Amino acid sequence: MERPLGAVILAAGLGTRMRSTRAKVLHELAGLPLIRYPLAALRALRAAQVVVVVGHQADAVAAAAPPGSPGSRRRSSPSSAAPGTRSHAARPGSSTSKGTC
């Protein structure tokens, strides 16, 4: 029996190494915000659940990937972790998707 695919996208980065005030996933590549690429890949893989962990500029990140866009069956989970800590950033995603990833 095939298990459903679940995924957590860590999208809470500040983008400081990019020397920008814009959230990392809002920078564009080929005219699209970076957040769109993993969402499109997960849509192609028919992921059953996608959790997007947001933090810095959460509203702008949500607007860059609105409902109806690739990965529209996602749940946003705000990160209250200290900036720059990957393991802490993943915690909100892990608590909302127990048993599905």
Image (cartoon, helix red, strand yellow):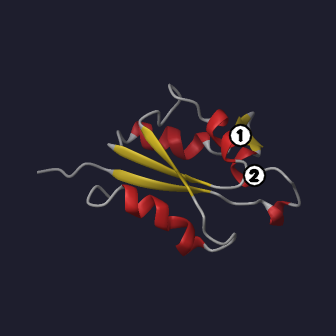
Earlier sequence position, callout 2 versus callout 1: 2
Q: Is residue 44 left or right of residue 69?
A: left
Percent across and percent down for residue 84 are 68, 72
Callout 1: helix, strand or loop? helix
Callout 2: helix, strand or loop? loop
Percent across and percent down for residue 99 are 26, 60
Residue at 64% in and 57% down: 12
**3D distance between C-alphas at marks 2 and 1:** 9 Å
13 up-or-down from 74: above or below: below
Q: Is residue 50 left or right of residue 99?
A: right
Quadrant, the C terminus: bottom left
Disc 2, disc 1: CB below 8 Å? yes
27 up-or-down from 87: above or below: above
Percent across and percent down for residue 36 are 60, 39
Number of disc labels = 2
Residue at 60% in and 64% down: 80
In the picture, residue 43 is in which quadrant? top left
Local packing at callout 1 (Cα closer than 10 Å; few below 14, some 14-19, many 20+) is some
Residue extending furthest front?
A: 80
Q: Is residue 86 left or right of residue 72?
A: right
Indicate the amino acid at tag 1. Ala
The residue singled out by tag 2 in the image is 23
92 up-or-down from 42: above or below: below
Indicate the amino acid at tag 2. Ala
Local packing at callout 2 (Cα closer than 10 Å; few below 14, some 14-19, many 20+) is many
Percent across and percent down for residue 52 are 52, 50
Residue at 71% in and 54% down: 56
Q: Name the residue nearer the viewer: 74 or 43.
A: 74
The residue singled out by tag 1 in the image is 60
